[in-house]
Amino acid sequence: MNETKCDIAVIRGDGIGVDVTDAALAVIEAARGRTGGFRLDCDDLDAGAGYFKETGKDIAPGAEDACDTADAILLGAIGLPDVRHADGTEISPHLRLRDRFGLYAGVRPVKAYANAPQRLADPRAAGIDLIILRESTEGLFYTAAATGREIVQTDQEVQDILRITRRTSEKLFDFAFKLAEKRKARGKKGMVTCVDKANVFRSMAFFRKVFDERKTAFPDVPVSYNYVDAQALDLIRRPWDFDVLVMENMFGDILSDLAGGLVGGMGMASCAEVGDAHALFQPAHGSAPDIMGQDKANPLAAILSGALMLDYLSDRTGGHTGLADAAQVIENAVEKGFAENRLRPMEFGGDMGTKAVTRELIDLIGGA
Ligand code: ATP
């Protein structure tokens, strides 16, 4: 049988990033064992705070170029509290990758699992299943996201810029509508909410105008609008009513943490950052120095990010079924594992560390 081969740039990084990436790769391999049809060639690349401490560089020579030519980048976590650049800033080569490769679409799934923590008493909270789609290269992070972007900064006044461009917004909205279509095909709501502050900011009115223009190309996708303050309220009052929520960078930064908090902890927060020709997959959490080296980390955020990567690779390679099926196999196993109380991460007061969760998931995938 013909196998599709994908090149993966793997950056384990620091702290628990190493363990959760190993877990993700092991689970992907188990899923591949079920579906076949593809092979991942992994290129292990050094980067992060530990590497910086040893070498004075935040990423190995040639590693950025290796990311450039790979089909996808799989990243663990980067950063250690006592390791900083001379100016006090954090070691963050992954932000440079985001900028260099134009990874504008930040996909943050938020899904409730049975027996995982739910912060809302309403039983409908069991049905939370939404995506925060965060534009990730401009918005209010524009001047913070890369060096060399001039801002007013004197001792009397400092300004940041909220930048919305037609080019990026069109791509972002097309991504949102296609994502909604895909989710609809998988039995989900398949609708898009434009989250903005179009009643106050010209930049946000422009954001909504471009949204309205692009939605005409997707007439079958239902849309709605919400101001960001009302959306914060609605994420507490009725999060089960939403599907794909698309917004600018800073709003997405804040609301993805809020929404993630509704369904568990950082150990469930998966993330994809997608551009025109590149994509990076990583758990939304950091290196968690307080628990590193103790086999306590919940690997599911990294594992679910791995499933997002397989789904992306499926699209990238022309819809090869093995890859999309393997992503589905992983998602189903996580769902079943929680429903049958076979996944009990320590993060939620359970008895299972990183290795035990990974082993159980591999058993679930294998049908044990
Ligand atoms: P960063 O700024 O890099 O995001 P941070 O210190 O703000 O880092 P994390 O490293 O994500 O944030 O850790 C925040 C808290 O969440 C810590 O108490 C950490 O132990 C916990 N945490 C993060 N990831 C996990 C995980 N996968 N499993 C269990 N606990 C986790």
Image: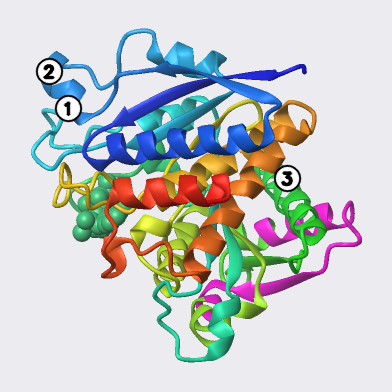
Neighbour tally class for label 2: few under 14, some 14-19, many 20 plus, Cα within 10 Å: few
Which region is colored magenta?
207-231
Task: Determine which residue is flagged by label 2.
Answer: 54
Asked whether 229 or 16 is in front, the reply is 16
Task: Determine which residue is flagged by label 3.
Answer: 170
Give the CA separation, mark 2 to mark 3.
42 Å
Task: Find residue 120 and report its horizontal and vertical position in percent.
Answer: 45, 85
Q: Is mark 3 on a helix, strand or loop?
A: helix
Q: Is mark 2 on a helix, strand or loop?
A: helix
Amino acid type indicated by mark 2:
Glu
Residue 185 placement: quadrant: bottom right
Picture residue at 50% right of the left edge, 74% below the top: 114
Task: Find residue 40 and report its horizontal and vertical position in percent.
Answer: 56, 22
323 left or right of 61 in image: right
* Residue 199 shown in magenta: no
Give the CA separation, mark 1 to mark 3.
39 Å
Say if mark 2 contacts mark 3, CB within 8 Å. Answer: no
